[in-house]
């Protein structure tokens, strides 16, 4: 069977992710499925602050910063080093180190291009109010943190794009198998029985949601699901 041009373009990297999402949205709209439409709309326009965030959009960073030990008159200083977390509980570590990217793909693209073309650092600043907590779990009352930031590399965002594009490819390949060439962005949904349409939607859900990366509708939510990015030279 001839392969759809829209699949070839996505596989060859000759079309950007936003256009691929919009094309797939036209096709998925035919199924009138809330979860599928919500996912693809969120990828295009960004996730609301109270939305379920896919696990592939949650990146774990490293805590970096500066601190000193001793008195103001006599002390040792460490600048831009990895800050230990000591006996900090895992759930608190997750809240501290995880960064959720809720932006739409175009905003993410601009962010990663800015990072790749300069020496800026991507991550989230840690509020000074939290510094004593870090020192507490290090059991070190003499640890005086002066700055802290959870840092990540731009490769983490490239990985988000790779995951989205891979899912889109799987979706398009399934639709092509069921409906033929997709280049007109028009599938004959009426050519399938009700049961067949239900089965196709189930398979689409498996591709997009049921690999433990996305949890929509099961009550799971990643805390602090707002993008907290800061950039410094």
Image (cartoon, grey):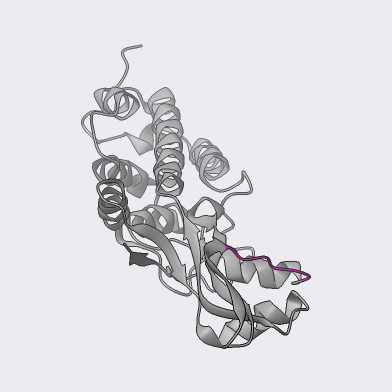
Q: Is residue 165 above or below residue 132?
A: above
Horizontal relation, residue 41 to residue 127: left or right: left
Please name whichever residue, 150 or 173, is drawn nearer the observer in this view of the structure: 150
Please name whichever residue, 228 or 186, is drawn nearer the observer in this view of the structure: 228
Please name whichever residue, 185 or 93, is drawn nearer the observer in this view of the structure: 93
Q: Which stretch did the figure color magenta? A: 82-87
Residue 168 position, x and y percent, is 40, 38
Q: Is residue 71 above or below residue 213?
A: below
Residue 107 position, x and y percent, is 28, 58
Query: Measuring 40% from the left and 67% from the top, which residue is drawn there?
Result: 229
Q: Is 51 one of the magenta-colored residues?
A: no
Instruction: Quarter of the image for the C terminus: give it.
Output: bottom left
Q: Is residue 218 above or below residue 198?
A: below
Instruction: Quarter of the image for the N terminus: give it.
Output: top left
Residue 57 position, x and y percent, is 48, 55
Q: Is 84 one of the magenta-colored residues?
A: yes
Report whether residue 222 is seen: no
């Amino acid at each position: 069977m001839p392969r759809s041009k829209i699949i070839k373009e996505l596989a060859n990297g000759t079309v950007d992710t936003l256009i691929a999402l919009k094309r797939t949205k036209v096709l998925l709209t035919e199924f009138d499925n809330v979860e599928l439409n919500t996912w693809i709309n969120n990828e295009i326009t960004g996730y609301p602050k109270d939305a379920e965030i896919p696990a592939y959009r949650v990146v774990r960073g490293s805590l970096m910063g500066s601190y000193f030990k001793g008195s103001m008159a006599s002390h040792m200083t460490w600048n831009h080093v990895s800050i230990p977390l000591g006996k900090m509980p895992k759930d608190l570590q997750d809240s501290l180190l995880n960064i959720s990217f809720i932006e739409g793909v175009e905003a993410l693209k601009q962010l990663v291009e800015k990072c790749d073309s300069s020496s800026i650092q991507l991550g989230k600043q840690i509020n000074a109010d939290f510094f004593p907590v870090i020192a507490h779990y290090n059991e070190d009352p003499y640890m005086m943190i002066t700055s802290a930031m959870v840092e990540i590399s731009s490769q983490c965002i490239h990985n988000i794009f790779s995951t989205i594009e891979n899912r889109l490819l799987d979706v398009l390949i399934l639709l092509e198998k069921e409906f033929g060439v997709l280049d007109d962005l028009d599938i004959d949904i009426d050519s399938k029985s009700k049961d067949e349409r239900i089965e196709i939607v189930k398979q689409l859900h498996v591709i997009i949601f049921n690999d433990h990366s996305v949890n929509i509708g099961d009550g799971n939510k990643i805390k602090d699901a707002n993008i907290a990015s800061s950039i410094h030279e």
